[in-house]
Image: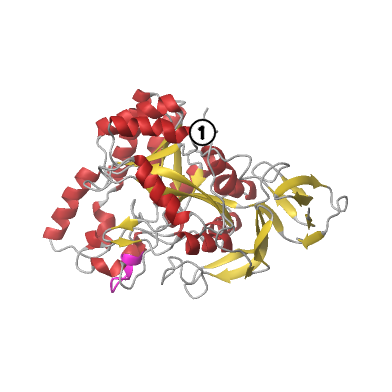
Amino acid sequence: MTRTLIHGGLVITASDEVHADVLIEDGRIAALAAPGVLTADRTIDATGKYVIPGGVDVHTHMELPFGGTFASDTFETGTRAAAWGGTTTIVDFAVQSVGQALREGLDAWHAKAEGNCAIDYGFHMIVSDVNDETLKEMDLLVEEGVTSFKQFMAYPGVFYSDDGQILRAMQRSAENGGLIMMHAENGIAIDVLVAQALARGETDPRYHGEVRKALLEAEATHRAIRLAQVAGAPLYVVHVSAAEAVAELTRARDEGLNVFGETCPQYLFLSTDNLAEPDFEGAKYVCSTPLRPREHQARLWRGLRTNDLQVVSTDHCPFCFTGQKELGRGDFSKIPNGLPGVENRMDLLHQAVVDGHISRRRWIEIACATPARMFGLYPKKGTLAPGADADVVIYDPHAEQVLSAETHHMNVDYSAYEGKRVTGRVETVLSRGVPVVTEREYTGHAGHGAYLPRSTCQYLT
């Protein structure tokens, strides 16, 4: 059995910062000790670096079918890019199509991922068709470790659920311990505004943001919260982008409800200015919920500091500009919705530490520990402690880099953060003790990643 020692670094978890050596045996953390106490067969020098848990990104969409095309990252390319960015666990979304059993959708996603992932992975289940059989299947999926279910108040005719369907699924999750994840936008009203905008000849990408109004995100967030309250179920609202929606979450949490919120780097670092870029460049930034005016960012950062927002995930759903985003030339409603970002999240959030928005421990909390707790993976994932999987990142907090499509590893032809300078960079990444990135060289392989059955939410009050 090989023993690996990570020596000389500053170990940062959600709760502690300590100069310690980390001993790894048989794919797990065996011990943390004062520098110089432990010995091993192999030593990794982390002097002057941070030693942090691998990132846990609980919102990705590899190979997602959308708008007549597919997200451009496969499970192989997407998990490799995640590893390059210091993320060692993803939870992706299996999709139930209308008229299909949950099991059919889950089996299809297992087939896409199995043998192809560079890092460990799990699945949420998108529930598109709530009926008696679906509700029974939810119980079975929870028992076997698929413990979260996503519903959409948006995309009528595709993923949309009405309030009655949402309430029934929430009631079921209240019984079986599952967690409902909600895309909270009033899709029925948005479709009216889309049609009206196109009729006026407003076809450019910037109108995508203008019709998907912040008030319609806030209204849907409020409605989802109250439906969950009626059902006695916890609720996790995905990709929160608007100050008004944060206010709804804050109010619910002040009432003591088990309501949680996730935001994404694009809402913290990008804005409607990007959607308005000329020559159809704004199409690169079309996602839903949409980018908001810059003034919303301060409220999102505050929500992260006050724990009214608990998690930063990517909603990684990349479509190439050439041939995919271009499907919407002349009609913004046909632009595939989604941004690339699985490789950039840990670095962007470290930049937030540099900029003074959050602390180092909060960085690890929102990117590693809380996502693992929220979705039943802690303490196997999300921390550095004896018994945890040895998912470890050696992070150079002083290295500078420029984010660019020329140097990223995501399978997409543009970067949402092209030209952005950030301080901090991943140097070495271990997944269950196995080096997948070694001093800025990829040493992993497809098939190393293991499927993760999950327990139920560990973050309930």
Residue 98 in the image: above or below residue 210: above
Report the front residue among 174 and 357.
Answer: 174
Q: Specify whether residue 308 is painted magenta.
A: no
Residue 296: x %, y % from top left = 40, 50
Protein image colouring = secondary structure
Residue 102 in the image: above or below residue 79: above
Residue of label 1: 456
Residue 155: x %, y % from top left = 25, 48
Q: Which residue is drawn at 27% across and 49% down?
A: 213
Give the magenta range. 276-284
Report the front residue among 258 and 278.
Answer: 258
Q: Is residue 357 left or right of residue 264?
A: right
Q: Residue furthest left?
A: 199
Q: Report the amino acid beneath label 1.
A: Thr
Residue 344: x %, y % from top left = 52, 61
Report the front residue among 198 and 296.
Answer: 198
Q: Which residue is drawn at 49% across and 76% down?
A: 406
Residue 358: x %, y % from top left = 57, 49
Examine the rendering and report whether any part of residue 242 can be seen.
Answer: no
Residue 201, quarter of picture: bottom left
Residue 20 in the image: above or below residue 402: above
Q: Is residue 15 left or right of residue 350?
A: right
Examine the rendering and report whether any part of residue 168 can be seen.
Answer: yes
